[in-house]
Amino acid sequence: MPRTKMTRHELKEQDEITTSLQKFTDFVVLRKKEVTTALTVAAVLAIVVFGYGYYRSNRNANAQVQLSQAINTFNDTVNIKSDKERYEKTIVEAQKTYDQYRSLPIANIALYYVALSQEGLGDTAKATQTLQHVAEVGDPSIKGVAQFATGAIYKKHGETQKAIDVYKQIYDRGGYSKAAVAYELASLYEANKQPDQAKDFYQKLVSEFPDSPFRQNADDALKRLGVTAPPAGQKPS
């Protein structure tokens, strides 16, 4: 059955969801050191995206049930003691979701979990290939998450320039928390002994996103890099 036009109430609700997701993204990425890996952070974001969408038909509801099994398996570190087994089972469940519901947007979230599990099993080449596919064909709600996860994989494996290239694409084109991406870029440049570029993105964060949860980290980094605090209303020099 064709999808009906969204009501004003639904449009307002969607806008509120987008705002909430943006704030949640900033908070979770800021706390990512308290999570197992940056990829797990991205997985949490994908769960949020999943939790807010696609409730309009029985087919979508069934797809959600199927995907929830994959998500629950991915996060089940209590009953599944072996990470290898957990990732392998996740791939089976997520692939089943994709195969059965590939015409629905939710299928790309399933592929996202396939990619995270492939990375968990050590198959980085397949993981990045799967994430790139999700970024190419997925809707905006999952595209940015997939791109961010791709950058996280490159960063995890020390491929700094590739990570920078991915994050710069996200920063320029949007689709993900710009403050979070700016912070990642600044941190990567600083770690890569490129202080001028690092200062630039830390300063962008401070001036463009003064209320971001990354603000204090950026201020501390600028001091560490020898940038003195400017008078009120001016950018750091």
Image (spheres, helix red, strand yellow):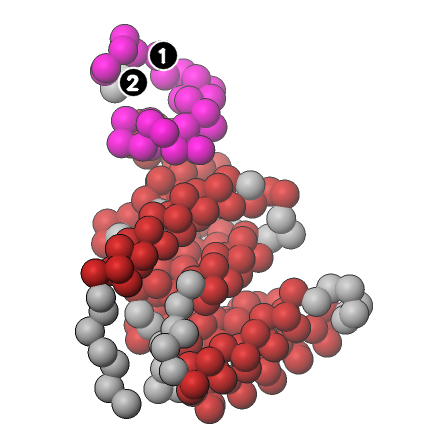
- Give the quarter of the figure containing the N terminus: bottom left
8 in the magenta segment:
no
Near-viewer residue (107 or 166): 107
> What amino acid type should be assigned to the residue bearing mark 1?
Thr
**Height in image: 172 above or below 140?**
above
**Height in image: 102 above or below 237?**
below
> What amino acid type should be assigned to the residue bearing mark 2?
Pro
Does 164 sit left or right of 31 as displayed? left
Query: x and y percent of residue 183 in the render?
Result: 40, 38
Name the residue furthest top: 231
User: Residue drawn 21% across and 61% down?
Assistant: 8
**Height in image: 234 above or below 63?**
above
Report the disc number at residue 236. Answer: 2
**CB atoms at circles 2 and 1 under 8 Å apart?**
yes
The residue tagged 1 is 228
User: Residue drawn 66% across and 73% down?
Assistant: 73
Separation of residues labelled 2 and 1 (CA atoms) = 7 Å
User: Residue drawn 60% across and 84% down?
Assistant: 92
Near-viewer residue (130 or 140): 140
Q: Secondary structure at mark 2?
A: loop
Q: Secondary structure at mark 1?
A: loop
In the rendered image, is residue 77 in sight? yes
219 in the magenta segment:
yes
In the rendered structure, which segment of residues is drawn in magenta?
205-234
